[in-house]
Image (cartoon, rainbow, N blue to C red):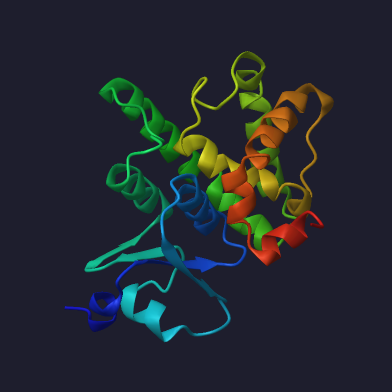
Amino acid sequence: MNTLATRRSIMTLYSGTDCVLSHSCRIVLQEKDIECELVFTDPTDTCQELAEFNPYYETPTLVDRDLILYDAFIINEYLDERLPHPPLMPVDPVSRAKQRLMLMRLSRDWFGSILTLQENNKDREAHKVLRDGLIAISPLFAEQNYAMGEEYTLVDIILAPLLWRLPSLNIVLPKQAQVVEDYSQRLFERDAFQASLSDTERDLRGF
């Protein structure tokens, strides 16, 4: 049994200061008002505790007493099920399956490009993938307030950190995608989003 895990009386999230996936977990914590210790780690430094909990030495990593989780999608769904108010996933199985499919597509199609651009924001192919993808989904936001309809869900929570980083990734959307900008502002104005930002993330937009 992990001795560090058993010594902790509250939940702990190991998070990068500018990790797009860690950021989504911090938003979930704020939306649900969960008491949690945040431990920010720098990829260039060695955090001995994180190395003990996660064999891949990756953020985000969540420690909840004897339970240790990594992968933001798993962490976010666990938090939603563990503390179900406010709900961030639909109740019915069909809608839940559709949401999981959308999350899988975002993970597979976009997040590799985000990581590429965070290392080299001049990568043309990664720019194209993200820009074209956002333009393709823009008609959704002309008809509804959120990604999956009129309810705010985990899909929006995954998209918000990505959208926040667009200027720092040198991605400029055309006028035809103005609805994406409007959608972004709805996400950014939420109290939970503002409270989730690290100092590094605030600096991305000059806050």
From the viewer's side, name the closer residue of 160 and 102: 160
Question: Where residue 35 sits: x, y (%)?
Answer: 41, 60
Q: Residue at x 52, y 43 (%)?
A: 158
Q: Is residue 50 visible?
A: yes
Give the quarter of the image for residue 154: top left
From the viewer's side, name the closer residue of 37 and 177: 37
Is the C terminus in the top left, top right, bottom left or bottom right quadrant? bottom right
* Rendered position, 5 above or below 192: below
Q: Residue at x 79, y 22 (%)?
A: 176
From the viewer's side, name the closer residue of 127 and 72: 72
* Rendered position, 24 above or below 198: above
Task: List the single residue furthest toward the top.
Answer: 143
From the viewer's perspective, is 25 left or right of 10? right
Task: List the single residue furthest toward the left.
Answer: 1
Is the N terminus in the top left, top right, bottom left or bottom right quadrant? bottom left
Q: Residue at x 57, y 40 (%)?
A: 159
From the viewer's perspective, is 16 left or right of 177? left
Q: Is residue 125 visible?
A: no
From the viewer's side, name the closer residue of 127 and 154: 154
Q: Residue at x 66, y 33 (%)?
A: 186
Give the quarter of the image for residue 95: top left
Question: Where residue 150 sits: x, y (%)?
Answer: 52, 20
Question: Where residue 3 sits: x, y (%)?
Answer: 23, 83
* Rendered position, 49 above or below 182: below
Question: Where residue 172 sits: x, y (%)?
Answer: 80, 40
